[in-house]
Amino acid sequence: MTQFSDLGLAKPLLKALTDKGYTTPTPIQAQAIPTVMTGRDLLGIAQTGTGKTAAFALPILHRLAENKKAAPRRGFRCLVLSPTRELATQIAESFRDYGKHMGLSVATIFGGVKYGPQMKALAAGVDVVVATPGRLMDHLGEKSAILSGVEIFVLDEADQMLDLGFVVPIRKIASQLPKERQNLFFSATMPNEIGKLAGELLKNPAQVSVTPSATTVERIDQSLIFIEAQRKRPLLAELLADKAVERSIVFTRTKRGADRVAKYLVASGIEAAAIHGDKTQGQRERALAAFKAGEVKALIATDIAARGIDVNDVSHVFNYELPNVPESYVHRIGRTARKGKDGVAISFCADDERPLLKDIQKATRQTIPTFDRRNDKSLAAAAAVADKLAPPEKYVDPRRADPRNNVPSELRRQRNRPNKGGGQGQGQGRNGGGRSGGGQNAAAKSGGGDFRGPKRSGGGGAVTAVETRWTPID
């Protein structure tokens, strides 16, 4: 059996792996590490939980240490793009853990936090940067980051990047990278658009595939319950009350739905917290920390967290609502049964979700065992008081049927409307700038990445058209 010591990794890396108790690489690690160490491009296909972060982090650290040199000012030697803040944080933590005896620097770049510390971290140059595309685009636009020194480019969770609409910014970022570089491309599935993107970025790549596309972990005990939509919350509370449920993640389709479920569970006496794209970075970090510490039994999440949460000992995953994108089912339930352990995945299905169930079973090539709890009198009684514990909100999300309803806020472009009345009237933007005189457009100040304020003409003080910018939140 292959050991990490057989792969030719540097001694400081082997020491860090020994400190963590790792001796035997996973299949994708055993296949990918020797290839990446040679400097060749790689296309890796592996489902979540197979250890692909170490599959690229270990050989990258080995290569950077083998040819140790200073990163350029405001630049970096290795760039890893990640779809979510949580995943970016976890990847950066892995780089730090594996490289703790090597003296290499690691930084994260994502939205929801202030620019200052990120600019300061980049100023002197960094060996490894893990970034979300939107915030990186902002730094590139402000010249606080440059890509001319990138030697290794990693695109992680490429198929989720596609789901979240990141393909265009990825292409823009790639266009600024040096032509001579190593490219590593990792994805759990390979839809046509991702295959096309891989063809654009990779040069004669080696391909590593450890599992067929869109398969689920064998150690997960899957089941599905048919239930009326209005009775899902009482059913969830009933299942979470079971002592066998030690630590669980509950997936909803919308952000407001996640908040509503969490509110109901708390009112029912079950420790729960919600995490999604509209939460601040501090709220997301506190909820995740409480979940990891065992203070919260149920973490209610949207699909933005399906691949961004790496927590050990998640005993159960509940699909409160089935995902619109069938591949997301694989990533959701992949939060349990990690590192060789067993897990349970229970999905709820209302009558209007049956087409989604059909798509999931077709994509995974599996028939999920089903149970019927419709017309359950005990759930009917509980549902009657559910709205009193957590009243439904009047607001209806117009994107609730959109499979991309969890698009990070950084992808929501904001345009400043032109001033009326030759600079003397109102200056209103989408975010409600209020009234401002003298040609000042207050709404421009509330735009996402344009934190230097609106551009002005050199003449009479009128506000010129402001370039559309990424809103730097995710």
Image: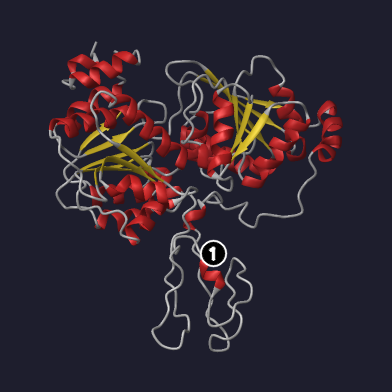
Q: Quadrant of residue 169?
A: bottom left
**Left-right relation of 1 to 132:** left
- Image position, residue 354 (x, y; %): 63, 40
**Left-right relation of 235 to 359:** right
Identity, as a three-letter code, of the amino acid under mark 1: Ser
- Image position, residue 426 (x, y; %): 61, 80
The residue lying toward the viewer, choosing from 455 and 212, is 455
- Image position, residue 416 (x, y; %): 52, 72
- The scheme the figure's colours follow is secondary structure
Residue 22 visible from this viewpoint? no
- Image position, residue 148 (x, y; %): 20, 53
The residue lying toward the viewer, choosing from 361 and 53, is 53
Query: Where is mark 1, residue-wise?
Result: 446
- Quarter of the image with the N terminus is top left
When the figure is inspected, residue 80 is found, relative to residue 413, above or below; the finding is: above
When the figure is inspected, residue 171 is found, relative to residue 11, above or below; the finding is: below
Q: Quadrant of residue 264?
A: top right
Callout 1 secondary element: helix
**Left-right relation of 338 to 149:** right
Residue occupying image coordinates x 44% and y 68%: 468
The 10 Å Cα crowd at callout 1, few under 14, some 14 to 19, many 20 or more, is: some
The residue lying toward the viewer, choosing from 109 and 85, is 109
**Left-right relation of 63 to 156:** left
Q: Quadrant of residue 160?
A: top left
Residue occupying image coordinates x 60% and y 84%: 425
Residue occupying image coordinates x 61% and y 55%: 399
The residue lying toward the viewer, choosing from 44 and 87, is 87
When the figure is inspected, residue 223 is found, relative to residue 411, above or below; the finding is: above
Residue 69 visible from this viewpoint? yes
